[in-house]
């Protein structure tokens, strides 16, 4: 049979990724703190584990796809974490978006148990997880990546070795900085155009073939009636949640502080995304950021 894989974290991303591994012939054990999240995988033939350690017990590979670094640390290095079950020689692949310091801390604990670790965050959203077209940014040893490449190719079309442990995570955070700021830029362009009476479908048509083009503009123009498949036409259902974007920009800013850098637009964008949670929009797509752009008092 195929490799034995433990998959921990079956949310928006993890569920379709785990499905692809099953379809690709992996022998899959799954764990999620929300039992309902495991159900569809169990129906498809995966084994239910009682903890991350239990899932990892006989694994060749352990994959984590969790919301944040705190959850990754808990699910890997905690008392019932994957590292207390994973056999020596197995490979732990964290595909969550975390901070580089967390990636290095997990790798350090893994090595002490004889487990090799890769940080391998992804870009491509849930659609990319469903069709296996994620971009995977990998930090860690090239030799361990080579051993993992067949498995990762079930999940992603582009798998790039970015350097030592933590470098996959670092490249992912740089990507989030670009995407997060670009979305605010798109929102400001739409707001301005809307206020001045521009036809917003026309605006979209012109700018997607002009120098203002970007991935957020192409995939999620932030007003309804412009792109039928976009989040704005579906009550801003994600897509990529605004609270995850806020988290990613916070991670980027803390990595910047460690590097002695100031990132002024990242700071400004972070403040805007942080307004969506209190407005009840934290679980909406990040294109909802248009709704928290400030108005002039006299405007
Ligand atoms: P999600 O919140 O939908 O899923 C996370 C899952 O982890 C949930 O099912 C939750 O119950 C489970 N979980 C939480 N704590 C756990 C624990 N201690 N042990 C086991 N399971 C636990 O999140 P998501 O959208 O799937 O994102 C996962 C990661 O991938 C995040 O770091 C996110 O930033 C990143 N990411 C998301 C997208 C996207 O489009 N959603 C794209 C790229 C990267």
Image (cartoon, rainbow, N blue to C red):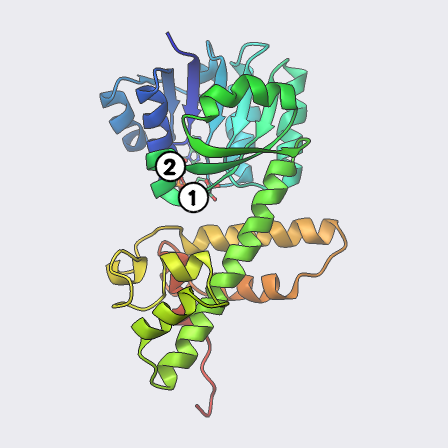
Sooner in the amino-acid sequence: mark 2 or mark 1: 1
* CB of mark 2 near ligand 1 (< 8 Å): yes
Relative vertical location of residue 250 with respect to residue 164 in this rendering, above or below = below
* Direction from residue 139 to residue 258 in the image, left or right: right
Name the residue nearer the viewer: 112 or 215: 215
Determine the secondary structure under disc 1.
Answer: loop
* Direction from residue 152 to residue 197 in the image, left or right: left
Determine the secondary structure under disc 2.
Answer: helix
**Label 1 sits on residue:** 124
Res. 81 visible in picture: no
Mark 2–mark 1 contact, CB under 8 Å? yes
Name the residue nearer the viewer: 108 or 127: 127
Residue 44 in the image: state x and y as whole percent. Answer: 24, 21
Task: Give the residue at the far bottom of this rendering.
Answer: 298
Q: Quadrant of the C terminus?
A: bottom left
Task: Give the residue at the far front of this rendering.
Answer: 209
Relative vertical location of residue 244 with respect to residue 129 in this rendering, above or below = below
At horizontal 37% and vertical 36% (from top left) the residue drawn is 129
Q: Quadrant of the N terminus?
A: top left
Relative vertical location of residue 26 with respect to residue 164 in this rendering, above or below = above
* CB of mark 1 near ligand 1 (< 8 Å): yes
**Label 2 sits on residue:** 129
* Direction from residue 193 to residue 233 in the image, left or right: left
User: Which numbered marker is on residue 242?
Assistant: none
Mark 1 crowdedness (10 Å alpha carbons): few <14, some 14-19, many ≥20: some
Quadrant of the image where one finds ligand 1 = top left
Mark 2 crowdedness (10 Å alpha carbons): few <14, some 14-19, many ≥20: many
């Amino acid at each position: 049979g195929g490799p034995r894989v433990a998959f921990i974290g079956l949310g928006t991303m993890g569920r379709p990724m785990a499905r692809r591994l099953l379809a690709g012939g992996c022998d899959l054990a799954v764990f999620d703190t929300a039992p309902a999240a495991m159900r569809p995988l169990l129906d498809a033939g995966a084994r239910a584990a009682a903890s991350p350690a239990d899932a990892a017990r006989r694994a060749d590979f352990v994959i984590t796809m969790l919301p944040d670094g705190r959850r990754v640390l808990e699910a890997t290095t905690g008392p019932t974490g994957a590292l207390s079950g994973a056999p020596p020689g197995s490979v732990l692949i964290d595909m969550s978006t975390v901070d580089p310091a967390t990636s290095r801390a997990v790798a350090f604990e893994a090595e002490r148990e004889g487990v090799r670790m890769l940080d391998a965050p992804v870009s491509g959203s849930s659609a990319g997880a469903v069709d296996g077209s994620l971009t995977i940014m990998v930090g860690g040893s090239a030799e361990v990546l080579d051993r993992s490449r067949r498995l990762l190719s079930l999940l992603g079309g582009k798998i790039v070795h970015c350097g030592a442990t933590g470098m996959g995570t670092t490249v992912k955070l740089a990507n989030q900085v670009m995407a997060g700021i670009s979305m605010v830029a798109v929102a400001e362009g739409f707001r301005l155009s809307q206020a001045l009476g521009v036809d917003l479908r026309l605006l979209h048509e012109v700018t997607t073939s002009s120098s203002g083009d970007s991935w957020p503009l192409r995939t999620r123009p932030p007003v309804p009636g412009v792109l039928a498949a976009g989040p704005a036409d579906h009550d801003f259902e994600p897509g990529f949640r605004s609270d995850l974007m806020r988290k990613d920009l916070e991670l980027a800013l803390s990595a910047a502080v460690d590097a002695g850098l100031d990132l002024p637009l990242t700071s400004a964008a972070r403040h805007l995304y942080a307004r969506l949670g209190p407005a009840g929009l934290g679980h909406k797509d990040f294109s909802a950021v248009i709704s928290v752009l400030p108005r002039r008092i006299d405007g």
